[in-house]
Image: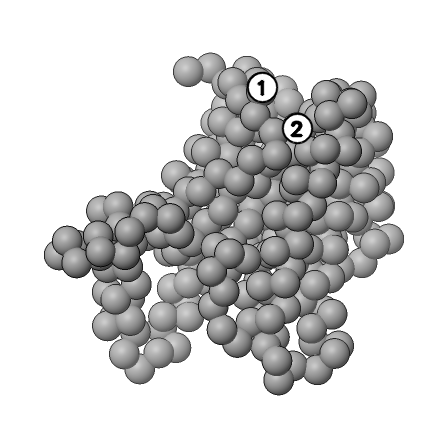
């Protein structure tokens, strides 16, 4: 299916994670569809990602940005528009489950909010004039923690709850401009960061098996390319009448009967 994304300018925050991360996978899927991936991230790894795409003949731009800094986000949008003159979609993909729990300081809690939800607001705020021109759309990457809780991560949980609230609020606000706003909710996906966490545990393999068994569909984690493929469909014209929605790409983790866990080998 042609998603009609050719030459669309798609801005993805949190897109310079390790190879195989959700953001890195999304930018490569964007390129596969003939769209132009714009990477916004503070990690200098993004320079190499953009250069690799350019070597393949794919237009791409990396704007190194501390997304907790409003000025840097505003300047990033200015740099994108200076090069391309438009923005067709924004994918807010920043997310660090930083463990800022009830024992965290005020500053740690606020830092978690700044990274995990305020950055979403700021990127959309500064990109909005250009989304209005293109009648583009917004996709926020959310987490099941906003709905299920996790324990020990008040900042991240509050932020991801805020992401879902913003998704619906923007859907309402932006109907008049023909701009759609949606969110993908992820439960368990075996990203490089997840693997790094597993390796810190003395019984990591046992924990990993237990987590896999908790996922009803096929007893496995969601693959990052499954998340990326869904993201591209949602931002495309093929999803032109979908707005204000939370799309769960989670193998049934959040909603399906827990009794199904017993059927997984």
In the rendered image of this protein, does residue 101 appear above or below residue 145?
A: below
Residue 117 in percent (x, y) is at: 68, 55
Q: Residue at x 37, y 48 (%)?
A: 255
Q: Which color scheme is applied?
A: one colour
Q: Residue at x 42, y 15 (%)?
A: 1
Hey, which quadrant is residue 261 in on the image?
A: bottom left
Image mark count:
2
Q: Alpha carbon of mark 1 to alpha carbon of mark 2: how far?
A: 8 Å
Q: Residue furthest bottom?
A: 103
Residue 171 in percent (x, y) is at: 69, 33
Q: Between 33 and 70, which is closer to the camera in this rendering?
A: 70
Which mark, residue 199?
none
Give the structural element (helix, strand or loop) at label 1.
loop
Residue beneath disc 2: 180
Residue beneath disc 1: 240
Quadrant location, the C terminus = bottom left
In the rendered image of this protein, does residue 202 appear above or below residue 43?
A: below
Q: Badge 2: few (under 14), some or many (20 or more) residues near its Cα, within 10 Å?
A: many
Q: Determine whether label 1 and label 2 are within 8 Å by CB.
A: yes
Residue 234 in percent (x, y) is at: 53, 29
Q: Is residue 28 left or right of residue 167?
A: left
Viewer can see residue 248: yes
Q: Between 85 and 3, which is closer to the camera in this rendering?
A: 3
Give the structural element (helix, strand or loop) at label 2.
strand
In the rendered image of this protein, does residue 116 appear above or below residue 130?
A: below
Quick one: label 1 or label 2, which is nearer the N terminus? 2
Q: Residue at x 43, y 59 (%)?
A: 192
Residue 244 in percent (x, y) is at: 61, 34
Viewer can see residue 61: no
Q: Badge 1: few (under 14), some or many (20 or more) residues near its Cα, within 10 Å?
A: some
Q: Between 125 and 159, which is closer to the camera in this rendering?
A: 159
Q: Residue at x 51, y 56 (%)?
A: 147
């Amino acid at each position: 299916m042609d998603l009609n994304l050719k030459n669309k300018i798609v801005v993805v925050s949190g897109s310079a994670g390790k190879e195989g991360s959700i953001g890195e996978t999304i930018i490569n899927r964007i390129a596969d569809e003939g769209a132009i991936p714009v990477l916004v991230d503070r990690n200098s790894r993004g320079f190499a990602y953009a250069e690799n795409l350019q070597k393949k003949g794919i237009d791409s731009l990396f704007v190194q940005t501390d997304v907790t800094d409003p000025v840097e986000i505003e300047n990033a949008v200015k740099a994108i528009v200076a090069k391309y003159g438009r923005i067709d979609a924004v994918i807010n993909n920043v997310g660090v489950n930083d463990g800022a729990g009830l024992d965290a300081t005020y500053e740690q809690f606020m830092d978690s909010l700044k990274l995990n939800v305020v950055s979403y607001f700021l990127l959309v705020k500064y990109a909005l004039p250009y989304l209005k021109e293109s009648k583009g759309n917004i996709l926020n990457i959310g987490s099941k923690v906003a709905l299920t809780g996790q324990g020990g991560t008040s900042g991240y949980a509050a932020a991801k709850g805020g992401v879902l609230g913003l998704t619906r609020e923007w859907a309402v606000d932006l109907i008049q401009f023909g701009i759609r706003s949606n969110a993908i909710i992820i439960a368990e996906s075996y990203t490089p960061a997840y693997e790094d966490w597993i390796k810190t545990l003395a019984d990591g393999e046992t924990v990993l098996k237990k987590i896999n068994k908790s996922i009803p569909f096929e007893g496995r984690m969601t693959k990052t390319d499954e998340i990326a493929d869904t993201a591209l469909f949602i931002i495309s014209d093929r999803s032109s009448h979908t707005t204000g929605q939370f799309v769960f790409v989670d193998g049934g983790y959040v909603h399906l009967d827990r009794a199904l866990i017993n059927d997984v080998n």
